[in-house]
Image (cartoon, grey):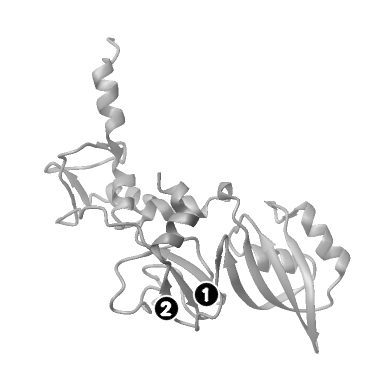
Amino acid sequence: MSKPSKNQDKSQSDGERIAKVMARAGLCSRREAERWIEAGRVEVNGKKLTTPACVIKKGDTVVVDGNVLPDKEPTRLWRYNKPAGLVTSHKDPEGRKTVFDAMPAHMPRVISVGRLDLNSEGLLLLTNDGELARKLELPDTGWTRRYRVRVHGSVDSKDLLALGRGVTVDGVKYGPITASFDSRTGANAWLTVSLKEGKNREVRKVMEHIGLSVNRLIRTAYGPFQIGNLPEGETEEVRPKALRDQVGMFLK
């Protein structure tokens, strides 16, 4: 079998994988794009795709659900103060109201950076760039997620300190977590909890592991972005300069 020529190699490197192109256009996440392709919803140059292993080059026409893929918009990012009771999903099989149902009419289609579960509140980052969302979710960014957590039960400072070494719960290994006691009101206590992984329901599961039941969880920071005084249910766009300063390295 003959080896590909240098020109062929260059042609391959000049393009981008279809799922990445769809994510950068703000249409969906890369993972969602792969599912859409497998479902037969995507065509390239008039031919329906059956696999995500497709490289898009300049001049190719991508059609999703009968509509030509829009050009990539400039990357934008918003802070959103999520109320409890909303699902962080574009569609919920149980018919519950989602974060995206609650967006103001002027908002473009956005994707969340990670998730907050149904009963969690606070800072959720939203972006029109699915590729950026994917990068900001990764623990490799080194960004700290910080929470105010109200728990029911007796708080043991030794248990909180031990979380700093990481813990395994039901076979799932969680990285180091910093947890400190803030105050107590009756049977409830407030803690400040910081972590860098953000696995599914991580705070709730880890607190339950040390005998504490979480009855309120508010994310106050995600990396350099703070919830600040943003009212519940409101969105605020991150200014272009702050966006460049904080996430510019992920846009290259």
Horizontal side of residue 145 vs 61, given as left or right: right
Instruction: Classify mark 1: helix, strand or loop.
Output: loop
Outermost residue toward the top? Answer: 1
Q: Quadrant of the N terminus?
A: top left
**Front residue of this view, candidates 19 and 13:** 13
Residue for badge 1: 118
Question: Which mark, by number, is residue 245?
Answer: none
Query: For residue 74, what is the image quadrant?
Result: bottom left
Q: Residue 41 location in percent, x, y?
A: 22, 52
Q: Amino acid at mark 2?
A: Arg
Residue for badge 2: 96
Question: In this rendering, is residue 188 above or below 146?
Answer: below
Q: Residue at horizontal 51%, vertical 54%?
A: 137
Q: Residue at horizontal 34%, vertical 61%?
A: 128
The Cα atoms of the two marked residues, 1 and 2, are separated by: 10 Å
Outermost residue toward the front? Answer: 241
Horizontal side of residue 72 vs 168, given as left or right: left
